[in-house]
Image (cartoon, rainbow, N blue to C red):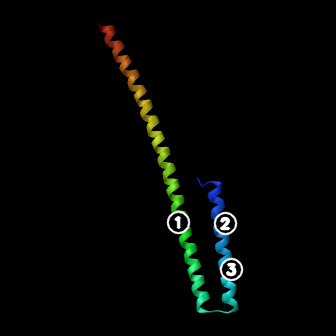
Amino acid sequence: MIDRVDNYKQLKYLENIMKILEVLGEWDRMKPTETTKQLIKAATQIGFYVNNLELDLLAHRTFESEHRQDKARAIERARRAEERVAELEKQIENRNQLRL
């Protein structure tokens, strides 16, 4: 799960990249130049790249969390199975002692 600090940082990043793109868009509307177009393209690519990194991080965290949960369930099943095996071994031992 994404914590509050990461959420805050992501929101601040989005706010800042949107400000940059708004200002660049205004400059391009007022006086279109090759430079403003290049800057808009570069800022947009940065935005997409960072968004992709954030999605990758979220996917990794989700996978990691699911993996931990799966591992914990497997350990719990193994513990229950070991307890059941111990119970059955005691029952077998008790029956063997009764036959003697």
85 over 2 or under it: above or below: above
Three-letter amino acid code at disc 3?
Glu
Judged from the image, the secondary structure of the residue bearing numbered disc 1 is: helix
Which mark is on residue 22?
3
The quarter holding residue 44 reads bottom right
Mark 2, residues whose alpha carbon is within 10 Å: few (<14), some, or many (≥20)?
few
Residue 42, position in %: x, y? 56, 80
Q: Find disc 2 in the rendering and name its residue.
A: 12
Query: What amino acid type is highlighted by mark number 2?
Result: Lys
Gap between marks 1 and 2 measured at Cα: 16 Å
Residue 27: % across, % down: 68, 87
The residue beneath circle 1 is 53
- Tell me which amino acid carries mark 1: Leu
Q: Secondary structure at mark 3?
A: helix
With 33 as the anchor, is 62 left or right in this view?
left
User: Which residue, as the protein is rendered here, is positioned at the far top?
Assistant: 100
User: 86 or 12: nearer the eye?
Assistant: 12
Q: Is residue 35 above or below residue 13?
A: below
Q: Residue furthest left?
A: 100
Crowding at mark 1 (Cα within 10 Å: few <14, some 14-19, many 20+):
few
- Please tell me in which quadrant of the rendered image residue 90 appears: top left
Give the Cα separation between the discs numbered 3 and 2: 15 Å
